[in-house]
């Protein structure tokens, strides 16, 4: 479905995750963060950049991997993106919700 | 004479030994299977042990009983593998040289990964049910427990049989009702996922069942530590959940041999091609069952479907033919829901579980994603199927290795 945010039209799924990363830019990131009641600091941007790089390299994301990434530890990841950090951070980063291996 | 070596005589390895013994014969081929254990456990039975539904003897048989006589069973432990030299170094100093190797070393719980989990309350009020010992200790605890807060918990994904903790919660509800003490027990289901399960349609059905059975759900809970003193679990965000009994599924990891051999990922699972089951690093190494990192369920049914396809691929490989990219992630799981009923789900890499009929489209007799007594009978009958058909590599009638889309109610072409 389509959604208008920061004056631009983006495509999202029913959970609000962007379906086309090419549509993402920094202002959309900021607007998505605001929807989740987060204002983005330089640390947030570092983590978002890391998640996007991993996504581009097709590396499956998990809390464990992020904790061992050297970019951020799990405790800080929770402080930056409270409650469900992986879900919230990937949503703001404009990348798909990580598929938990089943 | 060429040598095919299977590591691990659990569900997956035993099935491969049986399949391949019909095809790779002396004098051209010798097949060996290595496992340090002597007992073969019916792991799905661990779920029933705590509730006194199964007895230990229903679950345990000898490994030897299921290995064909033409296959050499080596009961010794592995120090490490040197895949570049096609060698398995044993702890007793001996060396096993192979032409083709199949890794079927499974996955194990690793409670030591979480701070405090294996602390003073381990097997006192903190239990696992993924080991025989854990399930048995829990049975003894539940037999005369007077009630309180029962917390059923998943540490992190992936885990073996991802529906088992839900089944545990459902069976616990049923167990305490039967003992006329359900009002004295508060059951909470705690998961790192954002819902009861990983796939949307099944999640909706299962959450409805949780609600119906008055089981609380706490989602998005990534555990940081078990506080043994105050009996609570705490997540990285500071959320606390108190318990009187914690039934946890600790982090699952592949075998430590993979770590020692430099063959595993960060959880010791072996990087594997998801459609051919060939190792990504070594052409003459194949991986099936829980040991691989493929994005399929870690479940016996998956290993069973993989085994049919892997047998074909091994035979192609030894003849120098190209491998078939056929495995589709097919899984088929009964989910016990308590009160003598169960659900059945059938899915693969691309198709989530939906409602429908199984195995005969439109007829059943089993119903997908709906509770029924017939599904429960299917689950109980499965133990017989496991010992008498599955391990021996006998094809289960009407159930194909790749998933069938007929008889299933898909709304559109769905990808998960």
Image (cartoon, coloured by chain):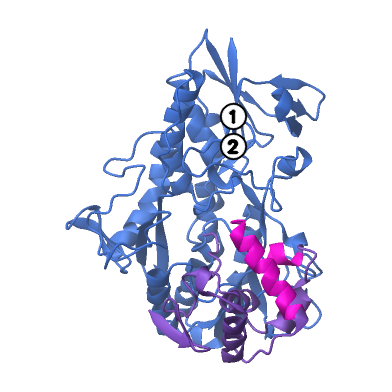
Chain colours: A purple, B blue
- Residue A46 highlighted magenta (yes or no): yes
Is residue A98 depicted above or below B388 in this figure? below
- Residue at 63 percent of width and 67 percent of height: A52
Query: Picture coordinates of residue B138 (x, y %)?
Result: 63, 65
- Residue B16 highlighted magenta (yes or no): no
| Residue A47 horizontal side relative to residue B280, left or right | right
Q: Looking at the figure, which quarter contains the N terminus of chain B? A: top right
Q: Which residues are magenta?
A: A43-67
Disc 1: CA contacts within 10 A as few (<14), some (14-19) or many (>=20): few
Does any portion of residue B249 appear in the rendered image? no
Q: Which of the chains bears the disc numbered 1? A: B
Query: Picture coordinates of residue B66 (x, y %)?
Result: 50, 31
Residue holding disc 1: B283
Give residue B279's mark: 2
Give residue B97's mark: none
- Residue at 17 percent of width and 56 percent of height: B363
Secondary-structure class at tag 1: loop
Is residue B233 depicted above or below B360 in this figure? below
Q: CA distance from mark 1 to mark 2?
A: 6 Å
Q: Hey, which residue is sitting farthest top in the picture?
A: B27
Q: Between residues A102 and A21, which one lies in front from this camera angle?
A: A21
In the rendered image, which quarter is residue A81 located in? bottom right
Disc 2: CA contacts within 10 A as few (<14), some (14-19) or many (>=20): many
Check contact, mark 1 vs mark 2: CB within 8 A: yes
């Amino acid at each position: 479905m389509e959604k208008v945010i920061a004056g631009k039209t983006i495509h999202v799924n029913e959970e609000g995750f962007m379906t086309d990363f090419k549509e993402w830019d920094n202002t959309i990131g900021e607007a998505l963060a605001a929807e989740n009641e987060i204002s983005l600091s330089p640390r947030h941007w570092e983590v978002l950049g890391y998640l996007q790089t991993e996504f581009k390299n097709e590396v499956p994301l998990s809390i464990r991997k992020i904790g061992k990434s050297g970019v951020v530890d799990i405790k800080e990841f929770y402080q930056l993106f409270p409650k469900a950090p992986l879900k919230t951070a990937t949503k703001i980063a404009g990348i798909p919700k990580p598929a938990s291996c089943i | 004479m060429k040598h095919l070596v299977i590591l691990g005589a659990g569900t997956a390895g035993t099935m491969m030994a049986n399949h391949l013994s019909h095809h790779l014969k002396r004098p051209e081929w010798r097949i060996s299977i290595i496992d340090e254990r002597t007992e073969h456990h019916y792991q799905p039975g661990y779920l029933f042990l705590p509730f006194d539904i199964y007895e230990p003897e229903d679950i345990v048989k000898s490994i030897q009983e299921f290995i064909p006589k033409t296959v050499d069973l080596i009961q010794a432990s592995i120090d490490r593998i040197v895949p570049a030299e096609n060698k398995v170094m044993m702890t007793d100093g001996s060396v096993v040289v192979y032409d083709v190797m199949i890794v079927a070393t499974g996955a194990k719980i690793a409670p030591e990964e979480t701070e405090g989990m294996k602390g003073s309350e381990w097997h006192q009020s903190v239990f696992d049910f993924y080991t025989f010992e854990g399930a048995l200790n829990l049975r003894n605890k539940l037999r005369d427990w007077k009630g309180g807060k029962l917390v059923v918990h998943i540490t992190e994904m992936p885990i073996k049989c991802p529906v088992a903790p839900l089944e545990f919660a459902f069976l616990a509800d049923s167990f305490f009702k039967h003992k006329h003490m359900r009002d004295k027990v508060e059951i909470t289901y705690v998961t790192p996922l954002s819902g009861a399960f990983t796939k949307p349609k099944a999640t909706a059905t299962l959450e409805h069942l949780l609600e119906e059975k008055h089981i609380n759900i706490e989602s998005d809970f990534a555990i940081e530590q078990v506080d043994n003193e105050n009996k609570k679990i705490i997540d990285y965000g500071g959320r606390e959940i108190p318990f009187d009994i914690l039934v946890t599924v600790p982090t699952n990891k592949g075998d430590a041999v993979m770590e020692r051999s430099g063959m595993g990922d960060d959880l010791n699972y072996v990087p594997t091609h998801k459609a051919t089951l060939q190792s990504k690093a070594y052409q003459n190494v194949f991986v099936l069952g829980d040991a691989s990192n493929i994005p399929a369920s870690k479940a016996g049914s998956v290993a069973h479907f993989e085994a049919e396809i892997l047998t074909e691929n091994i035979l192609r490989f030894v003849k120098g033919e190209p491998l078939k990219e056929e495995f589709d992630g097919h899984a088929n799981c009964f989910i016990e829901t308590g009160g003598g009923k169960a659900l059945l789900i059938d899915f693969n890499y691309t198709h989530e579980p939906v409602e429908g009929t199984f195995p005969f489209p439109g007829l059943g007799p089993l119903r997908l994603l709906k509770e029924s007594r017939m599904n429960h009978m299917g689950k109980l009958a499965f133990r017989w199927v496991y010992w008498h058909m599955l391990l021996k590599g006998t094809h289960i009638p009407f159930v194909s290795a790749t998933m069938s889309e007929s008889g299933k109610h898909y709304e559109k072409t769905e990808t998960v």
